[in-house]
Every structure is written in structure tokens, then in C-alpha cells.
Amino acid sequence: MSKARSSRRYLAGVVALALCVPVPADTSIELRDYCPPGFELTDANACELRTLYQNYDSLRHAGVGGPKTGLPEARDGFSPQQVDLGRYLFFDPLLSGDNSVSCASCHHPDLGFTDGRPRSVGIGGAEVNRAAPSLWNVAFLNTFFWDARASSLEEQMQGPLYAANEMGTSPVQLLADITANDTYLRLFRDAYPGSKGAPTLGQIYTAIAAFQTSLVSLNSRYDQYAHGFHDALTEPEKAGMNVFRSFVARCAECHTPPLFTNRQIAVIGVQEPNGRAFDPGAETVNENPGLRGGFKVPSLRNVAQTAPYMHSGTFATLREAAEFYTLGRGHALPDEEKTRVSVHWHIWEPNLSNDELDRLVDFLGTLSDERFKPHIPEAVPSGLLPIGTLPEALTTRLSQSN
Amino acid sequence: MGKKLGLVSAAIALLVAGVIGGMKFAGDNRGTVIGDSSRYRVETTGGALTRSVGGSGAGAVHEVRNGDSIQAAVAVAQSGDVIKIFPGMYHETVYIDKDDIVLSGVVIDDAWPVMEGASKLNDAVLYSGNDITVENLQIQHYKGNAIMGQAGNNFLIRNNRIIDTGVYGIFPEFGTNGLVTHNVLSGIEDAAIYVGMCDNIHVSHNEVFNNVAGIEIENSRHSIVESNYAHDNTGGILVFITPGLPIKTTFDTIVRNNFIVNNNTPNFGIPGSTVAGIPAGTGILNMAGDQTTIEGNIITGNQVIGILITDHMNAPNVTLDPDADPNSDEISILDNMMWNNGYNTIPEITALKTLELVDGDVQILNIGNSSNSCILDHDKYVTVGLKDFGTCGFTTTAAVTTYLLEEPAERREIAAEDMGKRAYYGVCAGCHSYSIKMVGPPTQIIQALYADNPQGIVDYITSPTKKRDDYPEMPPQNYLSEEVRMAAAQFMLQVKK
């Protein structure tokens, strides 16, 4: 996205907010009748994912293995109209309690669908306990939130939508806001042609999930290597790949190709930043003391875009995040946790050299691919400024360029 | 070693509860016949074990001599080629991300090609391709593994001498259909031969000694471990479900006709690893693996226990996984030659023995629920925790020669249309939509330009030039194979929406 365009939109939004003029229904918004890139439109008006990885199998269909391994089963089959309706909802601050933030305020396309913050900030500047995870390739995930407490996107999104310190709306307010908007009423009719009556919460969730599952990133230089073009990576990057998958660094044991996550929970014993209290993570969700301090293994695709790192932003750079794994098993745990946290067996003391850490960072950069990055709508049905509050990292970038 | 003691301490509580409650250990199930040979048997047509594994060797031969780089030969090798490695010292990590390659050492007058990691290099051989052979190499002093496979199918790893290569010696992971045979491995901090998350595996005629674990089958199915010599390790042969891995089951494992002798080496496992909890002196350890059949082994001189069956609840260093069944079910202990095991056992086993009023050294111990399990002869050996075991309804697994496949795995043909469709939508559609101007011109316009001329598209996308003022220059697509480029071009010319 060009900076000029976003600043223009920013200014337009300020004017609209200042005047507080009710926005008439926007008749110029029409839902697309074609699928986002990466998807084939079937005769049944469904968008089905197509990727070269479908040329490969995976052991027991688990979607883990090596370069030429099939992915886990993807969630797809939404209509183009549902995907596009989801795109408008995703960028519309109408979905927050005070109309100040949208999903994209914390999952911004220009920041790898994160917000560049150690921990997210919700309405009224409220701080959230954990970082916004990237949304790239969520179509392949089967659990959501850092502690894996949700098993579908629809279940997950009700967390931030209704949390007082995140988007702060409520089911009643959300439905009222949508049904009071003539443009949305028209778009919901287009996206759910068989359905009678007013939009439902389920339809809202479905549309947002449809958009989120369209965010596919599988065309990185690493992928070119994986499909057989070995010149796609430089020699230092190949060296980094071999450190990554070696049984010394063991990165690939949990960040397993092709998704670069094995979709499990792992206890790695990372410290909280700035003396924050220890986060029990998945222990609480599963009532499993063995998972104390455990978090979902995140995919590393587009990881170069999503600093800072870990569930609460402990590390500012990939280099620091990589170095954590060579500083010793449990080295960063508070004393009182050392005896009760069961650190994952792959966390040990690999004694990686500085050169090896540099090469790992080189390799992680090859996992970048934003070719299918969606367009931010020029306008959203509410008439509010699309996205609403921008992540600080982007406003800083904007002010620096002005 | 406090961790060792943790292994059965929980079991004591379990047992005490069972005795007091008068339920769990009250009965004796020997009168029930459990299991028959059909449970484990598959139809095999026989033939050489190697019939469906390893490289074809049909292509060119590349010779690598002392001072040359093995990786340089791999880089130029095509599928089907053989890389002959002559005696000498090789200091490198060799990685093979292509199919059908034979990496073959040449031994001359007792001189071997030696891959020397000097305790600095991570892994000696990493492969991800299918149909890979690694043979006749001496591999020593690496930090990670000697030979590691990640997702390669149809692998053949044989006749290698592997000494002190760090965590594992031979470690195929995520592979289907592989044979590990006639290797000699020692000095490994975890399992010398570690089969992790694989299907259809055969591990035979290997010698493993002075390792923490000799041979480990983990989260894998349809495996046969036979005719190996596992001696002087901490534990001889392990069959595990390790929780927290993405593939959750282990079943249909046959452990037969192995020598499992004097596995009493003090545990030098890496702190936190699962094997660091194995008591020094364990012959066979089955943790949560299902349908394990133990037959015809010679199990002697293992001071703690000959055969130990446990669930996850009683195992150390294990975090329960709700998606992994924690019990060892459908275990069959057929006839084995066992003596002189358990002669210097750990106090927890002595306590369990006392609870069951058993005299003598315990050869076989089960801890935890194990349903539909059996032993062929309840009276032959001193056992504890086997009263729920029935009497096996079969005596041998001889009907199954191997679980290796008759044909190599994943030789599937992909229709050109599917290939083209996946490339068109998966790659091209990032810039080209059917009728909308995106980054590049719409597909409709390209169709008009290149009607009936897919080769023209292939030629252009291989090395594009700037053609239009109002569009950026296209990046070359030469990273896609010629076959994929042609399939994509053909598909692009006939797509209709």
C-alpha cells in the first residue's frame, strides 16, 4: 500500500469524524463475484484453494514433513461474495463498541496481519495480555488463540469482538449496528442469497472467517526451493535452512514444513518482558499442569513481518528470538517456575554459533510472501474511516514520511 | 538419578489403591484367549526386502574422492544417479532435496569413507527426497544425527558405521516405507536408530551398543524390528507414543528375534529427554504403543527388567496429550528366551513385587491399564501386573515377512490439468485475474494473444521482457519446472472465469 494513499484516507476519516455527519447508504459498494487469488471459482459458486502443495501427500494427512509434503486440510469453499463481505467487515470499525477500531487495527495487512506491538491495544487504549498473532494461512489451523482455547475461527473471533479491552462490542450491539445499515443489509442479501430476514451473528462470523481463510501465503522463495528450484535460495540461506532443520537447532521439529508449525502446544520457557507476571498459557485452558507456560507453535511464514516475537513480545528481533533457543533449557524461567514447568524435550543447549544464528535469520527471511495480500477497501459500509485506529507502528511510519 | 525413580512411584499408589479396593488386580485372566494371528497379519508376496526401497541407480555415476565435496556431487546429480564416495575424510553436511539418489561409500582394503563432524557440524546426511539410499559410510562425531530423513519415502539405510553422532544415529521422520539394515551404531545420547512418525518400516540386522536407547519406534505404524543385536545400552528396544507430536499413534509393531542383552549402561541421556527417565537395565520398553507383539527375542542380563509395559501416567518426563491414548493396549507377549533379568532392579519394582506376593527376579512388568493384551505362557516367567492379560490365541507372527510395501510409496501420477490448475490459481492468479486488471493483464487478454500457443506463454514467462507501459515487468517463472509451466500455460488458455 502506498503511504500517500493511506495518509489521504486518514485525513478523509478525520474530516468525517469531526463533522459527525450520518453517512448515507453507499451504493457504490458491490461484492466481488470472483475469488481472491489462490482460489478457483467452482460451478457451485465456491472458492476452492489451489496450490502446488496439492501435488504432494503427507504422512497420515497430518500436513507435516519436509519440502515436498502436502499441507494440512484447508478450510475453503466460501462464496466470493462471502469472502468480500468479510473483507468489508474486517476493515470496518463499526464492529467495535465505540467505532474506533476494526479487526485490522490489530491485524494489519502491512504488518503481516499483526500490529507490531508486544501486546495489543484495544478500545480506549486498553492493553491486552498477549500479542496479536498473524492471520496468514489460518485456513490450515485447527486451534486458535495463543493458548489454543478455540477450535474454529468463528469461536475465536467472539473473543476480541466482545472483550471489553479489545473491540468492546456486544452481540446485541453488533447485530443492531449491522441491521441499521442499509448497505450491509444489501450486502448480506448478496452474500447469503437463500436466507430470509435480517443478518445473523452466524452470518457475520462466517463472512469474517471466509475472508480470513483467503489469506494464503505459499509463494515464498523457500517454496520455490521446495518445489525443486534450488537456485531460489542463496548459499547463506541454504546454510540457514540446514541449521533450521538440523537436529541440533531442531527448529523444524515444531515449526515443521510446509506450514512451519506442527499445530501443537509447546512449553519453551520464554520469559515475560519487563517483569510481567508469568503467563500459565495452555495450562489454564486444559487444566493440564504439564502445559504450564505452553503456547501454540506459531507458523513462521511471513515471520519477518511480525516483530516483536513470542506471545507477549519478549523479543524485538528475529535474531533475539532465535538466540533464546540456544541459551539453555529453562534459562529464562523465574526461579519459582523452574521446578513446576515441564519444558519441551526439544529445548536443550544446542550451542549454536553466532554465525549459525545469523544464518537462521537469513533463512527465516525466505519465508516471506505477501503476493496475495488483500486490498484495503477505499470505503466501508459504515462510512467510518476504514480500519479506524491504525497500529502505532504504521502511524509512526506515516509521520516519519511526512 | 531421581528421574528414573519417578517411573514407577506413581504406580505404587495405583497398585495400593487397586489392592485396597480389591478390584483391579484381584482377577486372573489367563483363561481368556485373546488375539489371533489375523490381528497382525498382512498379505505379502515375499521377495527381497529391498524391492521397493532405495534409489534406482539407473542414472550416471559421480565419483567423490578424498578432498572433494560430496555436496557438490549431490548438487549436480539428477534423479537416478549414484554418488560413489571413495575412502577419505569428509567434513561436511550433505543434504539431498531431490528424489532417487544413491549415496554409496566405497570400501577398499578396509579403508572407509569417513564423514567426520569434529563435534562441530550438526548433521552428516539430511534428506527429504523419496527413494534415497545411504550406505557404506563411516559417520562420526556430529552434534545432531548421522542420517536424518524428513518426509522422504522409500528410504534404504544400510551398512553404515555410526559412532558418537550426537542425539540420534539414524533418524527417519515422516517417511513411509523404509528399510534400516546392517548398520552398527554406538555412543548415541538418545536412540541409535530412531524411527519417528513413519509408516511401514523394517529395522533388521543392526548392532546397537553403548547408546542410551538402542532402537526406538515412536508414533509409527506397521513396523517390524527383527534380528538386531541391542546390547550394553541403557534400554534395548523401545516402542513409544510420545505425547505432543502431530501424529498421535503407534500400533502394529512386531519386535522379534532380537538379541537384547546386558543393557545396563548408566543413563547419559540429555536432561529433559524422554529417554533420560529410562532405568539403566531395561530390555524392552513399551510406552503407550498399541498392538505390539514381542516374539522370539533373547532377552538376558538386563538388570532392572526384561520387558516393561507402561502407560503415560506412570512414565517420567511425559506431559499427557488429550489426543493421544495413554494406554498400552493389545500387547502380545509370545514365546521369548529370557533369563537373568531384573536381578538388580529398582526399589519401586521390588515394592510392586511385594504387593503382588511374587518371589524371584521380575522378568516382565506391566504398569497401568492394558486392555486386550495377552501372554502366551503365564507360568514361564516371573511377572508383575499381568493378571489382566489373557492367553494369546496365536504363537507366531511368521506369516508376515515385512510391512514394507510391494510398490514404492507416492509414485502417483498427477494429471496435467490438475498440475496446471494448481499452478495457475496458486501462483499466476496473484497477478492475473480472468477479467479484472490486477498487477498483470487479465487472463482474457492473454488468451487472445496466445490462442493455441501455450509454448509461447512458456517461452515468455521463462524470461519475460517488459511489454506494456501500463504494467510492471513480469518476474521470471523459471523456478517452476518446464512441465509445470506448460501445464499452467495450457490451463490458462482454456480457463473460462
Image: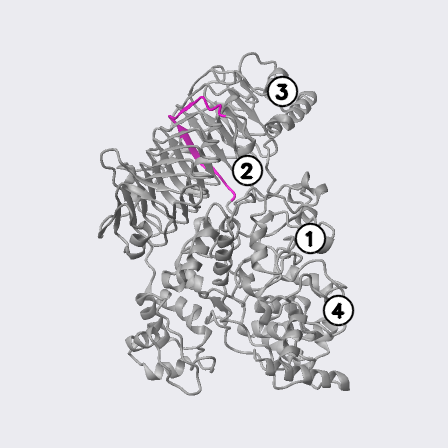
A154 sits to left or right of A216: right
Chain holding disc 3:
B
Q: Are marks 2 and 1 on the same chain?
A: no
- The local crowd at label 2, few if under 14, some if 14 to 19, many if 20 or more residues have their Cα within 10 Å, is many
Tell me the kind of residue under disc 2. Ser
Marks 2 and 1 sit apart, C-alpha to C-alpha, by 25 Å
Query: Which residue occupies 70% across, 42% down?
Result: A337
According to the image, label 2 marks what residue?
Answer: B273
Which disc number belongs to residue A123?
4
Q: Which of marks 2 and 1 is in front?
A: 1
Marks 2 and 3 sit apart, C-alpha to C-alpha, by 36 Å
Q: Which of marks 2 and 3 is in front?
A: 2
Q: Earlier in the sequence, mark 2 or mark 3?
A: 3
Chain holding disc 2:
B
Marks 3 and 4 sit apart, C-alpha to C-alpha, by 63 Å
Chain holding disc 4:
A
Say if mark 3 contacts mark 1, CB within 8 Å: no
- The local crowd at label 4, few if under 14, some if 14 to 19, many if 20 or more residues have their Cα within 10 Å, is many
Marks 3 and 1 sit apart, C-alpha to C-alpha, by 51 Å
According to the image, label 3 marks what residue?
Answer: B26
Does the image show residue B69? yes
Q: Where is residue B178 in the image (x, y as percent from the top left)?
A: 36, 42
According to the image, label 1 marks what residue?
Answer: A272
Q: Does the magenta stretch include residue B259?
A: yes
In depth, the one of A128 and A198 nearer the eye is A128
Q: Which of marks 3 and 1 is in front?
A: 1
For label 2, the SS is loop
Q: Position of residue A335 (x, y in %)?
A: 71, 42
Q: Do labels 4 and 1 share a chain?
A: yes
Marks 4 and 2 sit apart, C-alpha to C-alpha, by 44 Å
Question: Range of the magenta residues?
Answer: B248-265
